[in-house]
Image (cartoon, helix red, strand yellow):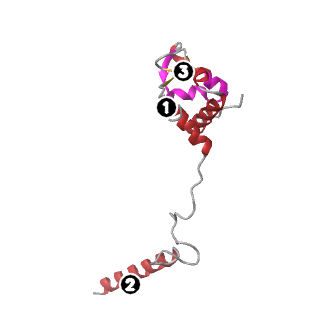
Amino acid sequence: MFNKNLFIAVFTLFFSSSLFASGGYSGSGSSSYGSGSYGSSDTPKRVDRAYESGKAIYKGRIKGKVVSYCIADESKSKASVKVKRSTIKQLKGASSADVGERLHNCANPKETMKSLLTQYQLNSVAYYLNKRYKLNLVRS
């Protein structure tokens, strides 16, 4: 009986201290400091518009034409491979102009990204790829 009472006392103490440590409970979801939760929907998320624009262009949502991008793989004697995390690491530290020259349409290798996109679109895609794959590209 003593063990059961001790267990209930410890459990109650632990539960109440963790409840007060997190700011208490507000049943209505509103208090003088906001909703009191970490996942509050009151604050809008910051959206990186340049990243989203580059992603949309890369995925073909802007022009309406979906292009499958390949990269000239230097390790395989100029063979062409699809862009993946492992293959695009070849561009680490390159310039954004080099990205435009090395990436091309898989269906037609003569269509480079530089010839398919405007300068603004190319910069947006280079920014997207740089941020997504941590390429540390230099400005050209």
**Which residue is labeled 1 in the image?**
64
Q: Position of residue 49 (x, y in %)?
A: 61, 45
Q: Position of residue 118 (x, y in %)?
A: 63, 27
Q: CA distance from mark 3 to mark 1?
A: 17 Å
The amino acid sitting under disc 2 is: Ala
Between disc 3 and disc 1, the foreground one is 1
Residue type at numbered disc 3: His
Determine the CA span between mark 2 and mark 3: 68 Å
Tell me residue 1's x, y (percent): 27, 87
Real-space Cα separation, disc 1 to disc 2, in angstroms: 65 Å
Any part of residue 94 in sight? no
Q: Are marks 3 and 1 in contact (CB under 8 Å)?
A: no
Going 50% across and 29% down the picture, which residue do you hit?
86
Which residue is found at the position 62% from the left and 41% from the top? 50
Which amino acid, by three-letter code, is at mark 1? Gly
Q: Earlier in the sequence, mark 2 or mark 3?
A: 2
Q: Nearer the viewer, residue 90 or 57?
A: 57
- Say which of marks 1 and 2 sits in front: 1
Residue 9, label in figure: 2
Q: What is the x, y in percent for residue 11?
A: 38, 79
The disc placed on residue 117 is none
> Measured along the vertical axis of the image, is residue 138 above or below residue 45?
above
Asked where in the image residue 90 lies, by quadrant, the reply is top right
Q: Residue at x 59, y 50 (%)?
A: 47
Q: Secondary structure at mark 1?
A: loop
Verify CB contact (< 8 Å) between mark 1 and mark 2. no
Q: Secondary structure at mark 2?
A: helix
- What residue span does the magenta drawing correspond to? 79-100
State which tag comes first along the sequence, 3 or 1. Answer: 1
Find disc 3 in the rendering and name its residue. Answer: 104
Magenta stretch containing residue 83, yes or no?
yes
